[in-house]
Image: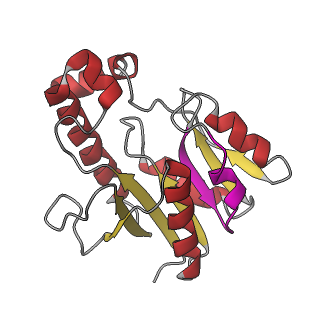
Amino acid sequence: MSKNLILIFVRNPALGKVKTRLSKTIGDQKALKTYTLLLDHTKAVLDKRSEDKVVYYSENIQHNDLWNKTHYQKKLQKGNDLGARMGYAFAAAFKEGYDNVVIVGSDLFDLKPLHIEAAFRALETHELVLGPSLDGGYYLLGMKTLHPSIFKNKKWGTDSVLNATLQDLKQQNVKLLEALNDIDTFEDLQGASRVIKKN
C-alpha cells in the first residue's frame, strides 16, 4: 500500500445527468460527449501517477468501464451534498492508514500530472493544499489530517467555495497551486474548443 492516495469523484455518465449547466447551451448529447472526454483525459493523467487511487461513483459502481480495477479501487459516494461526500471519502482514507490524501476533479482539460506531483510535494511542508479553479471553487484538495469544518456550510457549485474554505483554514499552513479552468458552462468550454473538435 502506498502512503499516498488520490480520490476521484465521478458522475455515472448518463444522458441528461451530467454537465447539466453545459447541456442548456449545447444539448444533452454533446454535454455527455464532453464529460466522456473529460473522464478520458482525467484517467490519462492519473494513469501516469503511482499513488493508490480510488474512484468514487455518484450513483452506482461500474465494473466494466474505463477505470481498470487493477489500478483503481472503486467505491460509492455517501452523503447528502458534495461536502458530506468528500468528508466521508477523506475520513475513510485516513482510517485506512493513508498519510497524504488528495482529491482531484474530473472536469479539467488543463489538468496535468505535474499538478498532482505539486500537490503531494506541497504536503511535505504544508498541512493542506488547494488547487483553485477560475470559477471560484477548487479542482484539487489535499491534506495530511482530516479537517471536517471545510466540508460544512458551503454553497457548493458557487463562486464562494474557495474563499469560504480558505477562511476556515486561516490558521493553517495552506499551499495554493496554479489556478485552472474547470468545465461547467459553455463559456468554460470555449477555451477548450480545440480539444473537443479534435475528438
**Quarter where residue 8 is shown:** bottom left
Q: Hey, which residue is sitting farthest front in the picture?
A: 80
**Quarter where residue 64 is shown:** bottom left
State the colouring used for the structure image.
secondary structure
Question: In the image, what residue occupies the spot 54% across and 33% down?
Answer: 133
Q: What quarter of the picture does the C terminus occupy?
A: top left
Q: Is residue 66 left or right of residue 162?
A: left
Q: Position of residue 37 (x, y in %)?
A: 23, 39
Q: Nearer the viewer, residue 122 or 158?
A: 158
Q: Is residue 163 above or below residue 173?
A: above
**Quarter where residue 178 is shown:** top right
Q: Is residue 94 above or below residue 90?
A: below
Q: Nearer the viewer, residue 137 or 14?
A: 14
Magenta segment range? 138-154
Q: Is residue 64 left or right of residue 59?
A: left
**Magenta stretch contains residue 140:** yes
**Magenta stretch contains residue 45:** no
Q: Nearer the viewer, residue 29 or 176?
A: 29
Q: Is residue 11 above or below residue 38?
A: below
Q: How many marks?
A: 0
Q: Position of residue 101 (x, y in %)?
A: 56, 65
Q: Position of residue 136 (x, y in %)?
A: 59, 29
Q: Hey, which residue is sitting farthest right in the picture?
A: 171
Q: What quarter of the picture does the N terminus occupy?
A: bottom left
Question: In the image, what residue occupies the spot 46% across and 29% down?
Answer: 181
Question: In the image, what residue occupies the spot 35% across and 62% down?
Answer: 55
Question: In the image, what residue occupies the spot 41% across and 35% down?
Answer: 110
Q: Position of residue 167 (x, y in %)?
A: 78, 41
